[in-house]
Amino acid sequence: MRQTFLLAACGTAIACGAATVHAASAEDARSFPNKPLRILVGPGPDIVGRLIGQKFTEAWGQQVVVETRPGGGGAIAVELVAKATPDGYTLLLASAAYTINAVLQPAVFGGMTKDFAPVAFCASAPFVLLVHPSVAAKSVQELVALAKAKPGGLYYASSGNGTPPHIAGEMFKSMAGVNIVHVPYKNAAPALIDVVGGQVQMMFAITSIGLPQVQTGKVRGLAVSSAKRTPLAPNLPTIAESGYAGYEVIGWNGLLAPAGTPRAV
């Protein structure tokens, strides 16, 4: 019995689950992988894909190329992987954005259940509500008061329309009863750059890229989007405990292969 290639030790950095399946043949089990692999990443940070690629390379000695294809809300990455040869060498790092877009854009994302084979759940994390230091708010309550005093005067960045940070912002907008303006970007990196630079006042950033900016003082963290506080930043309250019970938005990642990929791989 051989572990499937996507279940290699991803290390403690991510929670990529491990499981085993019977190889279809001894030849399949011995030969995979014998050439470089590709992991395509849609909208959002590519840090999880790079961590997975690093661990796969360490385990097999094969290069893993991580390609970011954020265009079309992830549609480009979906199309490329769906049409790839189902041999296990081209993979999609899916995220919560795809489940959202399956509802918003069914013509593009509605066929993912038949076009892909699920391989492994890899990681999940909350978002952190960030504001630029120039924003006169040190808590969610103060931010809401500021937004209500200046309707339409606060702008929040996201990694694109229909992405989890966008949903997080719209949920906050609805539950808090504030008028904040959405500014969509092609992915999370330029959005965060503009918040750090003060061009946009706030955003919901996944903790892996948001907390380092908080720790260096470049932005201020007000709260996290999970139902419970995260051990990564235990001093940050949740939005739910800040007065908005039931608020919860979590980002996640999983690996998908083209439909028809042999289970032995």
Image: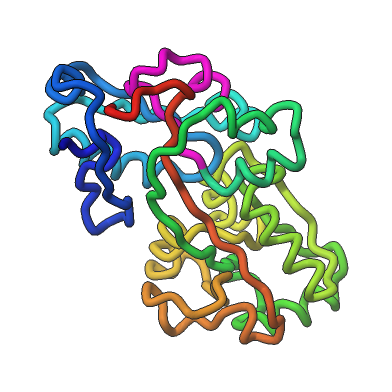
Q: Residue at x 56, y 32 (%)?
A: 70
Residue interval drawn in magenta? 78-94
> Residue at (49%, 53%) from the top-left corner?
252
Q: Is residue 154 above or below residue 177?
A: above
Asked which quadrant contains residue 138, the reply is bottom right
Instruction: Confirm whether the magenta stretch covers residue 68.
Output: no
Q: Residue 101: percent from the left, percent from the top?
A: 69, 40
Measuring 75% from the left and 78% from the top, which residue is drawn there? 144
Q: Position of residue 141 (x, y in %)?
A: 70, 84
Is residue 67 shown to the viewer in this render?
A: yes
Establish if 191 lies above or below 245. above
Question: In x, y percent, where is residue 223?
Answer: 56, 76
* In this view, 116 is above or below 167: above
Is residue 74 toward the left or the right of residue 35 in the image? Answer: right
Q: Does the magenta stretch include residue 90?
A: yes
Q: Is residue 142 visible?
A: no
Name which residue lies at 61% across and 45% down.
97
63 or 158: nearer the viewer: 63
Judging depth in this view, the residue of 213 and 30 nearest the camera is: 30
Vertical position of residue 117 compared to residue 95: above or below: above
Quadrant of the snapshot with the N terminus: top left
**Image quadrant of residue 71?**
top right
Tell me where residue 244 sits by quadrant: bottom right
